């Protein structure tokens, strides 16, 4: 296990707070809903202890974390019916291991570019106003790993 498993000397926003509305949690990680009006259904899977990289985890932890990420992808796909799902783990601004699960639609603000790129259009509102409740229900079915 690499040295970076210890918490850094600078404050970490994902160690100090949830990072969004918690939809599900176990000992390893939590699933949070990102409040972004342009990207409904955008979730993050955040490790509950501070590490920077996937290779800082034991093989068992890494496998369990990815099972959660893939379960969130499946739940988001079932509820949101996006054109595509983007999975990303950057951590350049917040060096605490977390995965982004972002539903993408052909009419979203940045499509086909990354959501952090230049805005291409205003974007459309998601059509199903009950998506939030449906997503919470789908995510709550994730079994503890």
Image (cartoon, rainbow, N blue to C red):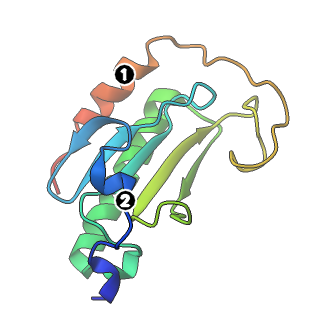
Quadrant of the rendered image containing residue 28: bottom left
Point 34% across, 81% down: residue: 4
Tell me residue 96's x, y (percent): 39, 64
Above or below, comparing residue 123 to residue 140 in the picture? above
Label 2: which secondary element: loop
Q: Relative to residue 85, is residue 92 depicted above or below?
A: below
Q: Quadrant of the N terminus?
A: bottom left
Q: Single out the mark in the foreground, 1 or 2.
A: 2
Earlier-in-chain disc, 1 versus 2: 2
Q: Classify residue 32 as left or right of residue 102.
A: left
Quadrant containing the C terminus in the rendered view: bottom left
The disc at residue 134 is: 1
Question: Label 1's element?
Answer: helix
Q: Position of residue 121 (x, y in %)?
A: 84, 29
Where's residue 75, x and y in %?
39, 38
Looking at the image, residue 107 lies above or below residue 114: above
Q: Quadrant of residue 136?
A: top left
């Amino acid at each position: 296990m690499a040295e970076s498993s210890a918490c850094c000397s600078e404050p970490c926003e994902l160690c100090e707070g949830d990072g969004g509305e918690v939809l599900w949690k176990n000992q390893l990680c939590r699933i949070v809903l990102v409040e972004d009006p342009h990207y409904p259904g955008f979730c993050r899977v955040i490790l509950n202890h501070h590490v920077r990289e996937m290779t800082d985890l034991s093989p068992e932890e890494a496998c369990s974390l990815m099972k959660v990420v893939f379960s969130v992808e499946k739940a988001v796909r079932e509820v949101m019916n996006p054109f595509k799902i983007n999975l990303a783990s950057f951590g350049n601004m917040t060096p605490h291991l977390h995965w982004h699960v972002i539903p993408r639609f052909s009419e979203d603000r940045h499509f086909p570019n990354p959501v952090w790129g230049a805005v291409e259009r205003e974007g459309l509102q998601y059509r199903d106003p009950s998506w939030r409740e449906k997503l919470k229900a789908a995510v709550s079915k994730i079994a503890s790993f």
